[in-house]
Image (tube, grey):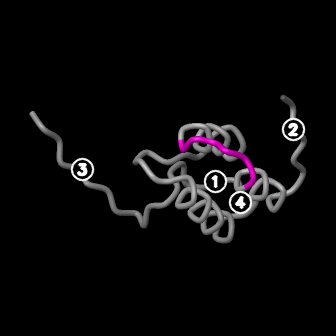
Amino acid sequence: MEVQINTFDELIDFLRANELTPKEVNEIIRLQFKAFYILDHTKDEMIEGLIDYWDKWKHTAERPPFIGYKNTFNLDVED
């Protein structure tokens, strides 16, 4: 199936209207924005996070690669 999406609002409408798994939503976001989620979220949480991400970064050339994070990561590594 080929879908033509021309605006951010059309993308959000597409994500909301279709029964997509969180993995599929993440893949669409990765392809469109070269950004993604690294932790599990529901589809609705991912869409809301994407809206926040777009509101903040829009067409900025150098956007962060991760969505939904407030620059806090748990860097603890197990041996």
Secondary structure of the residue carrying numbered label 3? loop
In the image, 67 versus 28, the foreground residue is: 28
Disc 3 residue type?
Leu
Q: Is the C-beta separation of discs 1 and 4 under 8 Å?
A: yes
Tell me the CA gap for discs 1 and 3.
23 Å
Mark positioned earlier in the residue sequence (3 or 4): 4
Tell me the CA gap for discs 4 and 2.
25 Å
Q: Is residue 57 above or below residue 23?
A: below
Disc 4 residue type?
Thr
Magenta-drawn segment: 17-22
Q: Mark 1 sits on what residue?
A: 62
Q: Mark 4 sits on what residue?
A: 60
Tell me the CA gap for discs 1 and 4.
6 Å
Which marked residue is nearer to the observer: mark 2 or mark 3? 2
Disc 2 residue type?
Val
Q: Is the C-beta separation of discs 2 and 1 under 8 Å?
A: no
Q: Mark 2 sits on what residue?
A: 3
Residue at point 56% right, 63% down? 49
Q: Is the C-beta separation of discs 1 and 3 under 8 Å?
A: no
Q: Mark 3 sits on what residue?
A: 75
Tell me the CA gap for discs 3 and 4.
27 Å
